[in-house]
Amino acid sequence: MSSIDIVAPLDHLDKEPPPPGPSLRRVLETLGEGGNAPLWHSDWAWENYERAVLALAREFGLWRLLEIGGGRDPAFAAAARENRLRLIVNDIDPLELARVPEGIETACFDVAGDISRRPELYGAFDIVASRMVFEHIRNVPAAWRNIYRLLRPGGVGLAFFPTLYAWPFLLNHILPDDIARRIVERVFPARAPDGDNPVFPPVYHWCYGDEGKLRRMLDPIGFSEIRILPFWGHHYLDRMPVLRELDFALNRFCAAIDWRFFTTYAYVVVRK
């Protein structure tokens, strides 16, 4: 494992913006044509997260990818090599970064913290992506402000996170952390503490699918484009057929009328 803290400072790299290219809206609309699940369902979001980031990289000519909260299980370890992207994996915990596969660069810092003493990070990345990280961040506005600083002009950020007020996450938010963790581990055994995807305490700060709410926080930061893709549905009731079908019908109805109060997940995509 190598670290940009020691061997690969990025402040010397070219920070000129790439060609303007298409709009975020056009790229995301084209992306919506793929996938095995309907675009409104969260299955689509899970199946197409990596594809979405790679499509944005390709369409905008981007290649330096910072994966926020990648820790022990970075999503782009294989895809970055195949698509000739320079991958840097971030985490707040050096012990998590110690488990990153050999040969991948790392950057240990808090995306919502004070990065003013890390000038080598400013404007150093073309893409900043995260999956299931923002629900654990206590100061989400600070995280988005830092993402703006981390991106070079023309760069793109994408955050994929669960949202309130979907009932599984509302319950998770209300219950004590230990009880919520045990429930999640029982439903999804692969999320045990020694697995690739352990359960970390969530806070759900600014985790909404409502575009109006999110824009009130994001617009002042200065991004040139902001797109919010809402998703509905989950698999927490798969072992309960009757409740599963009722819940699916409710989520399909919410999606049909674009009722974002009850989204389950969201993509927030921004461009500097």
Image: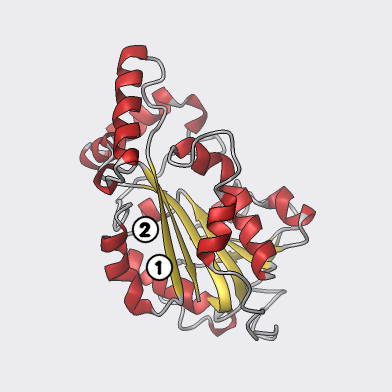
Q: Looking at the image, can residue 69 be seen? A: no
Decide: is 65 above or below 272: above
Q: How is the image coloured?
A: secondary structure
- Three-letter amino acid code of the residue under disc 2: Ile
Q: Earlier in the sequence, mark 2 or mark 1?
A: 2
Q: Position of residue 203 (x, y in %)?
A: 30, 51
Q: Position of residue 51 (x, y in %)?
A: 63, 49
Quickly name the residue at label 1. Answer: 143
CA separation in Å, label 2 and label 1? 8 Å
Splitting the image into 4 quarters, where does residue 241 fall?
Answer: top left
| Disc 1 packing (10 Å; few <14; some 14–19; many ≥20) | some
- Three-letter amino acid code of the residue under disc 1: Ala
Q: In the drawing, does residue 165 fall left or right of residue 136?
A: left
* Residue sitting at x 47%, y 76%: 148
Decide: is 164 above or below 143: above
Q: In the drawing, does residue 176 fall left or right of residue 256?
A: left
Quickly name the residue at label 2. Answer: 137
* Residue sitting at x 46%, y 77%: 224
Q: Looking at the image, can residue 9 be seen? A: yes
